[in-house]
Each structure stands twice: as C-alpha cells, then as structure tokens.
Image (tube, rainbow, N blue to C red):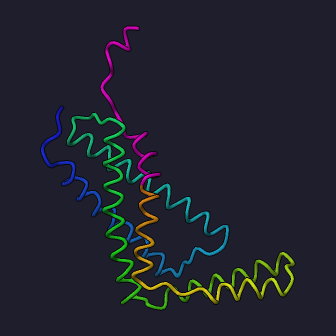
Amino acid sequence: MEEKTGTFWKSALNHGVIFGIILIIIQLVMWMMNFIPVGIGKGLLTLFISFAIYVIAVMLFIKNYRDKNLGGLIPYGKAFLYGFAVFMIASVIGSIFNYIFLTFIDPEYTQRVIKVTAEWTESFMRSKGVPEEQITMALDKIDSKKIPTALGSSVKSLLASAIMGVIVSLISAAFAKKEEKDPFKEAR
C-alpha cells in the first residue's frame, strides 16, 4: 500500500508533539519530586529508564504510522527516518520548554544541581579515602565552572538529543520495520 501524500510529516509532527508533551511531564514530575539524578547509581538508573522509554515510545509511534498510513509495511530506512523525525520534533519542544523552565519556572535549578553534584562528589571522595587536597581541587573545579545560560543549556540539550535520536531510532526501527516478503527468497 502506497503512503498518502503528506502523511509522513503530518504524522511525525503529531507523534512528535505527543512525545514532547510526555517528556515535559516526566521532567516536571522529576522536578516536583525534587529528584536530581546525581551520582553513579542514580545517573545510570535514570539514563537506562529514560533510554528504555525513548525506544519503546518511538517504536510504538513508528508502528502506529506503519499500520495506519502504510498498510502495515515499512522498510527499515523509512522507519529510521520517521523515528528520528518524531524524536527531533519532541526534542525541539523539550528544548523550548527547558528554556522556559530555566528562565521563568525555576531559574535557580542549575545552581541547585551543581550544589548537589559538589556535595555528592565530596561525600563519594571522602568515602573512598581520597586525600583532602584532591577533594579540594575537585570541588574548586566544580565551583569554577561557568553556569550555563538557559539558552545555552537548551541548545546543548538539542544537540545531545540529535545524537540520542539517531541511536534510539536505529534501535526502534529494527523492532518496528516490517517488509514485504520476497517470494523469490522463499522459493530458494
């Protein structure tokens, strides 16, 4: 079945907006719970859960597009492009929200993250018996870092999302692709 004209971008935009709203809700819930993923355990757990959510969501969006607009078939390349488009639309929405969040909702958020990071670093280093001068050097390095602006943070987030979008879309497309069986391959 051939794709209806214009459905790729219309569908990608709809799914991207839905995914963007989901990402905003997750960010707001984490903020309301005062959850800052600092430290090895929390950081890795947050990364793993986020990555799983991204892959599953993009896979479901690709499958929905495949089944509703393409008659149940989508080659891997098109599935990848669709997933990447959805991810990037959601990322743009998320970056705009991130700018609004850091500018108007909680301008002190980045400073709190830096403070919690410094406290965790000091505690971790002390628990490992690191000499005091090395702890001081590490904390001075954290303190000397320039706090990024809301715009800088949002742009950096968007660039990181492009890399994440490629990885997520490659994986999601592998699960969502469905191609017509080649009758000549079956006969061999």
Say whether residue 185 is left or right of residue 36.
Answer: left
Magenta span includes 167: yes
Q: Residue 9 placed where, x, y %?
A: 21, 53
Pick the residue in front: 21 or 185: 185
Classify the position of the N terminus by image quarter: top left
Pick the residue in front: 181 or 133: 133
Q: Residue 178 placed where, x, y %?
A: 34, 33
Q: Main secondary structure of the magenta part?
A: helix
27 in relation to 134, above or below: above
| Name of the residue lying farthest toward the left | 5
Q: Residue at x 38, y 88 (%)?
A: 103
56 in relation to 30, above or below: above
Magenta span includes 84: no
Q: Residue at x 33, y 64 (%)?
A: 90
Classify the position of the C terminus by image quarter: top left
Magenta segment: 166-188
79 in relation to 167, above or below: above
Q: Residue 83 placed where, x, y %?
A: 35, 50
- Quarter of the image for residue 182 reads top left
Say whether residue 9 is left or right of residue 149.
Answer: left
Q: Residue 88 placed where, x, y %?
A: 34, 60
Say whether residue 83 is left or right of residue 133.
Answer: left
Q: Residue at x 49, y 86 (%)?
A: 109
Number of disc labels: 0
